[in-house]
Amino acid sequence: MTGTTPNLQAWIGRCRDEVATAAVEPLRALNALLDTNRDLSPGAPLPPAWHWMYFVPSVRQSRLNTDGHPLDEEFMPRLAGTRRMWAGSRLHFRGHISIGEKLKRHSEIVSIASKTGRSGAFTLVALRHLVTGDTGEIDERQDLVFRSPTHSVASEPDAAGLTDEERIWDERRLQPDPALLFRFSAVTFNAHRIHYDLPYARSEGYPSLVVQGPLMALLMLDQLYRTDAAAPIGGFNFRARQPAFVSDELLIQKSPAGSGFLLRVTTPRGVASEMEVVV
């Protein structure tokens, strides 16, 4: 079931324009966090999705809600009594953005829909971000889900077509810890307390600190880089399926899929996040 409530209809089409520089400092921080060794010299291509280190929120401390999200925003609607989750994104790359370039980002709310799924009612807000530089652009569609605090999380089946027995996986294991989540929240200036404040995370019904969705996406892209560094990435989409917690051992896996790759992060409970990469 889908629909759009009248008071949210007015937000559709709202736009925001921002500027930034593809500075190297936050990239060095992410490079260290991921334990990787990317080329971050001036003029080098920006690794896929590392633009998430830019255009970070700059909300005043006095305007944060108790959960760490902004109390109010000029661009995004505030749905009282709900919890926000970055449910997934679809990205397409044209050319490449180089480190050191000046960047522009045009963001637009393209749809807001009330839906009912297997885990209950929720509101889906779809954003489109167009990031442009001198030598390339990134076209991203981001899905944000707003749910009641009482919802239950249901995992979803693998939608990629092949069974685990038929797949060949390159994989590595990672045990997250509070320092990893804290550092990622710091470099992205994300104040949502479920990622670094254990008593608060438990007050929202989570058993432990919650691993950030975009961090899992970057871990999947890092697994692709570690095993196929030369693979050209034309785009990807990732989708969160269920939460992963700091107490979980994460299995980060990559498998060929058609002309691209399927990647996923699994926990002892099943698939937490998955990604399809187009090369």
Image: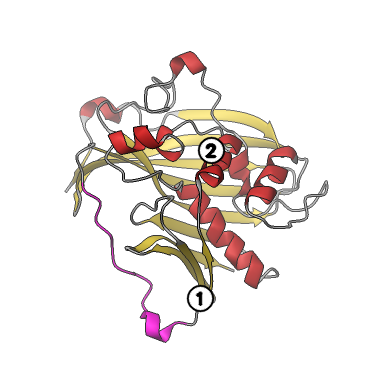
Which amino acid type is marked by label 1? Ser
Which amino acid type is marked by label 2? Ser
Q: Is residue 163 magenta?
A: yes
Q: Is residue 132 above or below residue 228?
A: above
Q: Residue 258 appears at what percent x and percent y?
A: 49, 78
Do callouts 1 and 2 mark residues in contact (Cβ within 8 Å)?
no
Identify the residue shown where x is 51% and y is 28%: 16
- Residue 279 quadrant: bottom right
- Residue 144 quadrant: top left
Mark 1 vs 2, N-terminal side: 2
- Residue 73 quadrant: top left
Q: Where is mark 1, residue-wise?
A: 255
Identify the residue shown where x is 34% and y is 69%: 159
Q: Where is mark 2, residue-wise?
A: 185
How was this image coloured? Answer: secondary structure
Q: Residue 59 appears at what percent x and percent y?
A: 51, 21
Q: Nearer the viewer, residue 96 or 23?
A: 23
* Label 2: element kind: helix
The local crowd at label 2, few if under 14, some if 14 to 19, many if 20 or more residues have their Cα within 10 Å, is: some
* Label 1: element kind: strand
Span colored in magenta: 152-167
Q: Is residue 173 above or below residue 66?
A: below
Describe residue 198's horizontal placement relative to residue 104 as left or right: left
Q: Residue 109 appears at what percent x and percent y?
A: 41, 35
